[in-house]
């Protein structure tokens, strides 16, 4: 059986753990620069607040609490939840910041076991989770959604598949989505049950191999295995909207240098090298192909700054910029001028190890700037309750 544990209203729930008064009020979490709503508490949903709504629509609503996103807190709380889930099964796949699959043997008391997991996660971390259990990952994903309406736990048995899928819209199925759902509706397929009853040859023609595997999973045949190692990203993007308009080249260089440094850190974390770098603003982009693949931050900062100089126009106002890395490889191909042994990689390892110990980077490059007036605004951010000695809750 596969279990999917899904944290309920995760960002909002993290805030409520350390400020329980928020449970009684509509709460929304805002994106960088406090621009739009990216998470809502149940009470905010009940008021009709929608994901992606601009924050200004609610700025005069005294009954709605608006907090800036505290990603340092959410990341640490996610790690605590995942460590708790791992106590129940060594076979775990962390699917996202607030979701994880577990694999275990079927058992007679599976309902009780799922309730025990849910209760333990709540007790140890303060985060409420919904748990769906099913014979396949695709069905477990559906079961976790039904669990939210069934007291937090839903166990999906094979003899219930057809009854449940008859009530399931195509767009609710993991891997189908809105576009594919609309296409299937034009073919007369409206529910997940109708899809699994269709002819196999027709399904493969319409959905391809991956889509056919999804259908097999809906029929109760496990196809997608647990992926215990996170899949390596094929590209890495670091971008931000600025807290104020940027008109000076030096500040724009600072920003892209900082983005390049963060992207390089993520690149090294998955032990990859990049052969492609792109710098972009809202007015254009500049691409650089790197002859010798690298993950060395100073090289990437230099290339990013060269790219942004080509894009910069005197008198223009910039509100956003970013850096993208691509064309990843694990092999370092040098040339005749490249030393056989280099200390660059060791230096980056030391820097990454130091920064990993703190809630914010302690070792940075001068090119990233000191004051950084371009940084995104987060005017109403909660403290870093779990990662900063100076911001621990005082009792």
Image: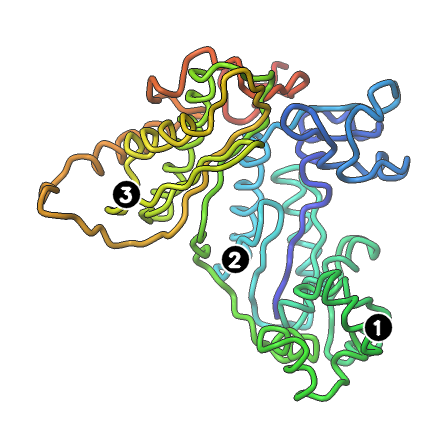
Q: Quadrant of the C terminus?
A: top right
Q: Please say whether residue 195 is visible from this viewpoint.
A: yes
Residue positioned 58% across, 49% down in the render? 96
First along the sequence among labels 3 and 2: 2
**Which of the pair 305/54 is nearer the observer?**
305
Residue 92 point in image, percent of width and height: 52, 58
Q: Which residue is mark 2?
A: 93
Of all residues shown, which one is farthest toward the top?
Answer: 371
Label 1's element? loop
Mark drawn on residue 24: none
- Whether residue 356 is visible here, answered yes or no, is no
Give x and y (percent) for residue 270: 37, 48
Specify the quadrant of the image occupied by residue 12. Answer: top right
Contact between labelled residues 1 and 3, with CB atoms less than 8 Å apart: no
Instruction: Name the residue tied to disc 3.
Output: 294
Pointer 2 local density, CA inside 10 Å: few below 14, some 14–19, many at least 20: many
Q: Few, some or many C-alpha atoms within 10 Å of disc 1 (few <14, some 14-19, many ≥20)?
A: many
The residue lying at 31 percent from left, 29 percent from top is 302
> In whole angstroms, how far apart are the C-alphas of marks 3 and 2?
29 Å
At 14% across and 38% down in the image, what residue appears? Answer: 342
Residue under label 1, please give it.
190
Q: Position of residue 21 (x, y in %)?
A: 78, 24
What kind of element bears circle 2?
Answer: strand
């Amino acid at each position: 059986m596969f279990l999917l544990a899904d944290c309920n209203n995760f960002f909002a729930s993290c805030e409520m753990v350390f400020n329980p008064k928020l449970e009684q009020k509509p709460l929304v979490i805002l994106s960088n620069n406090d621009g739009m709503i990216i998470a809502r508490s149940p009470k905010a949903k009940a008021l009709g607040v929608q994901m992606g709504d601009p924050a200004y629509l609610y700025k005069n609503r005294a009954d709605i609490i608006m907090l800036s996103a505290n990603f340092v807190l959410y990341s640490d709380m996610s790690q605590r939840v995942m460590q708790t889930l791992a106590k129940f099964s060594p076979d775990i796949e962390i699917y996202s910041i607030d979701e994880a699959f577990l694999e275990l043997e079927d058992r007679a008391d599976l309902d009780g076991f799922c309730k025990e997991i849910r209760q333990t996660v709540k007790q140890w971390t303060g985060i409420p989770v919904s748990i769906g259990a099913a014979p396949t990952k695709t069905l477990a994903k559906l079961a976790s959604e039904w669990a939210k309406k069934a007291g937090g736990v839903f166990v999906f048995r094979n003899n219930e598949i057809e009854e449940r899928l008859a009530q399931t819209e195509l767009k609710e199925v993991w891997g189908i989505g809105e576009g594919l759902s609309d296409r299937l509706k034009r073919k007369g397929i409206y529910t997940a049950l109708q899809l699994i009853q269709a002819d196999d040859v027709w399904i493969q023609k319409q959905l391809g191999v991956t889509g056919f595997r999804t259908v097999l999973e809906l029929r109760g045949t496990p196809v997608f295995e647990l992926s215990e190692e996170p899949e390596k990203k094929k590209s890495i993007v670091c971008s931000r909207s600025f807290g104020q308009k940027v008109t000076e080249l030096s500040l724009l260089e600072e920003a892209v240098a900082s983005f390049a440094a963060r992207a390089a850190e993520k690149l090294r974390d998955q032990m990859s090298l990049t052969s492609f770098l792109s710098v972009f603003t809202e007015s254009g982009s500049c691409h650089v192909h790197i002859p010798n693949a690298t993950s060395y931050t100073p090289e990437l900062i230099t290339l990013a700054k060269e790219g942004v100089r080509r894009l910069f126009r005197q008198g223009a106002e910039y509100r956003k910029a970013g850096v993208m890395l691509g064309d990843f490889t694990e092999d370092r191909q040098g040339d005749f001028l490249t030393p056989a042994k280099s200390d660059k990689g060791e230096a980056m390892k030391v820097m990454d190890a130091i920064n990993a110990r703190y809630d914010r980077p302690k070792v940075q490059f001068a090119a990233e700037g000191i004051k950084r007036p371009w940084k995104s605004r987060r005017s109403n951010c909660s403290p870093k309750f779990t990662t900063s000695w100076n911001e621990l809750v005082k009792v």
